[in-house]
Amino acid sequence: MKIGIFPGSFNPVHIGHLAIANYIVEYEEYDEVWFLITPQNPLKKKADLLDQHFRMALLEKTIQGYEKFKINTLEWEIPQPTYTINTLQKLRMLYPQDEFVLIIGSDNWDTFHRWKDYQLILKNFKILIYPRRGSDRIYFNHSNVTLCKNAPKIEASSSFVRKAIEQGKDVRFFLPSGIYNDVVECGFFKREAVDE
């Protein structure tokens, strides 16, 4: 099978994640997309991170019934911090019959040179880049890198959702159906009241 590996903290999962993954399996001839839930991105702060089991529960609730989406928690079993090169190598070892393609946004491509052993990723794995606003000018010259140029630009982000909830905004339509209340009620992103 041809499987797209979509890594992220999904903190929380939002409509942009799902729309991009949906486009890739339906229009780019992938058999499945695996959401690879990272316990901690080495380039991001941990302070804003929801519990990984809660993030997985939200994702499970969201993708239920769509057979082309799967969740992978391999990085939970690997010593921290996790690195994409190690994960991809482990996946290839566990599933030698499958082809794995790394899916990243153009914003991540901008910082790809900071990833651990990025040259090894480029040499040994294919990468599919989807467009993000602010990263429209994408330069690469490598046979293993492809731009998913017709994918829709969904300008939603987990950081936007977190900030909006902290500010008391109702952003239910930026989240998949059925999880907005779960995210709000967990109280993790709510701003604490300040005594005056």
Image (tube, rainbow, N blue to C red):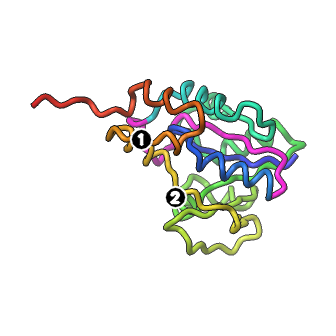
Look at the magenta stretch and give its main secondary structure.
Answer: loop
User: From what the image shows, is residue 131 above or below residue 11?
Assistant: below
Q: In the depicted view, which residue is nearer to us: 174 or 140? A: 174
Report which quarter residue 53 is drawn in: top right
Q: In the depicted view, which residue is nearer to us: 78 or 54? A: 54
How many numbered badges does the structure rendering display?
Answer: 2
Q: Position of residue 124 (x, y in %)?
A: 76, 57
> Which residue is rendered at x = 70% and y = 49% of the image?
21
In what element is the residue under mark 2? helix
User: From what the image shows, is residue 185 above or below residue 84?
Assistant: above
Q: Amino acid at mark 2?
A: Arg
Q: Position of residue 107 (x, y in %)?
A: 53, 61
> Which residue is rendered at x = 55% and y = 31% of the image?
179
| Quadrant housing the C terminus | top left
Q: Which residue is mark 1?
A: 162
Q: Is residue 63 left or right of residue 164?
A: right
Q: Nearer the viewer, mark 2 or mark 1?
A: 1
Q: Position of residue 160 (x, y in %)?
A: 43, 48
- Neighbor class of circle 1 (other Cα within 10 Å; few <14, some 14-19, many 20+) is many
Q: Is residue 43 magenta?
A: yes
Q: In the depicted view, which residue is nearer to us: 155 or 29? A: 155
- Whichever of callouts 2 and 1 sits on the residue coming sooner in the sequence is 2
Report which quarter residue 170 is drawn in: top left
Q: Amino acid at mark 1?
A: Arg
Q: Is residue 41 magenta?
A: yes
Q: Position of residue 178 (x, y in %)?
A: 58, 31
> Which residue is rendered at x = 73% and y = 54% of the image?
23
Q: Whole-Å distance between the Cαs marked 2 and 1?
A: 25 Å
Q: Which residue is mark 2?
A: 114
- Neighbor class of circle 2 (other Cα within 10 Å; few <14, some 14-19, many 20+) is few
Instruction: Report the span colored magenta.
Output: 28-48
| Quadrant housing the N terminus | top right
